[in-house]
Amino acid sequence: MAQTNVYDKLKELGIELPTASAPAAAYVMSAQSGNTVYLSGHIAKKDGKVWAGKLGADLNTEEGKLAARSIAVDLLATLHAHVGDLNRVKRIVKLMSLVNSTLDFTEQHLVTNGASELIADVFGERGKHARSAFGVAQIPLGACVEIEMIAEVE
């Protein structure tokens, strides 16, 4: 079965990839070892600014899910900048999500679905990945969500 062109799928979803972000400290946005690409944690942004807040206090699960989805778009932009062609992605291997949340907030997994669902929509079977979702006390710059990704490329 022929795989879907990733860029056609992005267009169908109404997504235009932004320019990949630059690192904010002493690290790189992506690193490759063999056929594995590791993407640094990306924080949620809204209207070009840090999407700050704490799930369970300032933001609800649906808002968190939208924040996670926005991060997935940024992760794809970084992956595109690294590999040059997203159609070279053999598989999205893993997402790791940090959700800035109150002690009693327990829906980190549902927040992270915002990213996981978009990745699966874009890549189909190649987008089904392993995942971890954690609740944390704080994220740099007060961001509500941070997600990193591991991908295998041809």
Image (spheres, grey):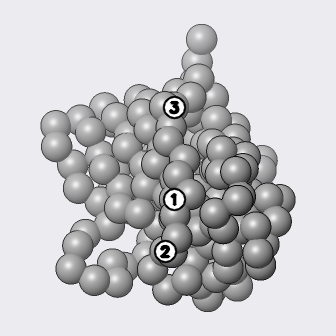
| Alpha-carbon span between mark 3 and mark 1 | 16 Å
Q: In the rendered structure, are the residues bearing label 2 and label 3 in contact, judged by CB atoms less than 8 Å apart?
A: no
The secondary element bearing badge 1 is classed as: strand
| Circle number at residue 139 | 2
**Left or right of 123, for residue 33:** left
Mark 2 to mark 3 CA distance (whole Å): 23 Å
Q: In this view, does 119 lie above or below 97?
A: above
The amino acid beneath tag 3 is His
Apparent side of residue 134 relative to residue 37 in the rendered image (left or right): right
Q: Which residue in the protein does label 3 denote?
A: 129
Identify the image quadrant of residue 143: bottom right
User: What amino acid type is highlighted by mark number 2?
Assistant: Ile
N-terminal of the pair, mark 2 or mark 3, is: 3
Tell me what residue is drawn at x 70 percent, y 59 percent. 104
**Residue type (three-letter) at the residue carrying disc 1:** Leu
Tell me the quadrant of the picture where the N terminus can be found.
top right
Instruction: Bin the neighbour count of mark 2 within 10 Å (Cα to Cα): few under 14, some 14-19, many 20 and up.
Output: some
The correct choice, above or below, for 110 with respect to 44 in the image is: above
Query: What is the crowding at mark 3: few (fewer than 14 residues within 10 Å), some, or many (at least 20)?
Result: some
**Residue under pointer 1:** 98
**Residue at 77% in and 50% down:** 13
Residue 70 image point, x, y percent? 66, 64
- Quadrant in which the C terminus is drawn: top left
Mark 1 burial class by Cα count in 10 Å: few <14, some 14-19, many 20+: many
Res. 19 in view: no
